[in-house]
Amino acid sequence: MIVIHDPKVLQQTALELRAQGKKIALVPTMGNLHAGHASLMDIARPLADVLIVSVFVNPTQFGPNEDYDKYPRTLEADKQVCEAHGVNIVFAPANESIYFPDASTFVNEHACSQGLCGRSRPIHFRGVCTVVNLLFNLAQPNVAVFGQKDAQQVAVLKRMVRDLHIPVEMVVGPIVRESDGLALSSRNQYLTARERAAAPQINAELQALADLAKTESDSKVLAKHFMDALGQDAVFEPEYIEIVNNSTMLPADKIEAGNTLVAVAVRMTESRTRLIDNIVL
Ligand code: AMP
């Protein structure tokens, strides 16, 4: 495994590999790697000759009052996770090498990114689309693997790839959870002990909603059920629950099995950590 910091070196290396007929898989991450990230590497590994993992805390996807500064940066440990999962190249660039000081080009998706997290994080998906486009240009992947944990990100990026005719196959890995159901996230370490103890209820209530959806198809009734359940504990401040079409992220008034996504964001009131989770009905 090699570690590349310089974007030009990565691009040159990737172009040479492609010229030799090698297939490249890319797993983009912000580092602080956990079993969720590792699962994406395991999915990507057999799909290509060369597996590249990028580790980059992308400043353009964080809002001004978000956790960019405190986001955990653990490159040494991340390298070990990559090594253990058969990664060939870790790409860990510095900010200054990715974004020119006067960078003035961004990629905007205008449909899938409007609701859900896009409402409270207005520049988030612009940053995500821009950096993923940029990483595609540097790593030249044939295939890229993303996690269903960030379901809206998947929808936005698939739309970007379609609309811009980007020649990358998009593969999605399932959500990896703790044994108590909490979705793995680098942000879980911000939680207080009380929040951590309560947090599995988010997934439990999503499961309960999925059960209820077998007999109740009205999205408003289902959403209210979730809000009321989490509202019982003052540690949760639900930001949204949206029941949407899994591809378009547009509201689904009625449930369409296999194609309807329930996505939630919950603010934890002690540490102000924002957790997201989702389930496909
Ligand atoms: P991040 O480092 O949070 O930007 O995530 C990098 C990639 O890992 C994204 O495609 C995420 O959706 C994915 N990911 C994060 N957490 C999980 C998880 N618990 N299960 C599966 N994939 C995940």
Image: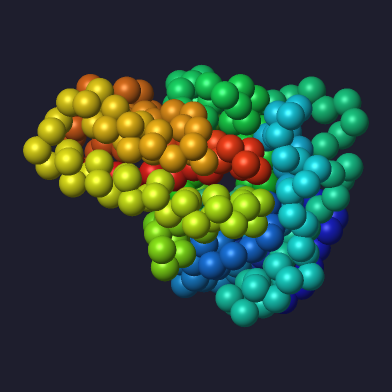
The image shows residue 199 at horizontal and vertical percentages of: 47, 51
> In the displayed structure, does residue 95 sit left or right of residue 251?
right
Residue 97 image-quadrant placement: top right
Closer to the camera in the image, 35 or 10: 35
Q: Residue at x 71, y 68 (%)?
A: 78
The image shows residue 129 at horizontal and vertical percentages of: 60, 34
Q: Is residue 97 visible?
A: yes
Q: Residue at x 81, y 53 (%)?
A: 93
The image shows residue 154 at horizontal and vertical percentages of: 46, 42
Q: Residue at x 73, y 71 (%)?
A: 77
Q: Residue at x 82, y 28 (%)?
A: 103
Query: Above or below — where is 139 with respect to 229?
Result: below
Residue with the most extreme left position: 215
What is the count of numbered marks? 0
Q: Quadrant of the C terminus?
A: top left
Query: Above or below — where is 276 with respect to 193?
Result: above
Closer to the camera in the image, 59 or 172: 59
Q: Is residue 170 visible?
A: no
> In the displayed structure, does residue 44 sit left or right of residue 192?
left
Residue 27 image-quadrant placement: bottom right
Q: Quadrant of the N terminus?
A: bottom right
Query: Above or below — where is 43 with respect to 55?
Result: below
> In the displayed structure, does residue 55 sit left or right of residue 206?
right
The image shows residue 45 at horizontal and vertical percentages of: 52, 70
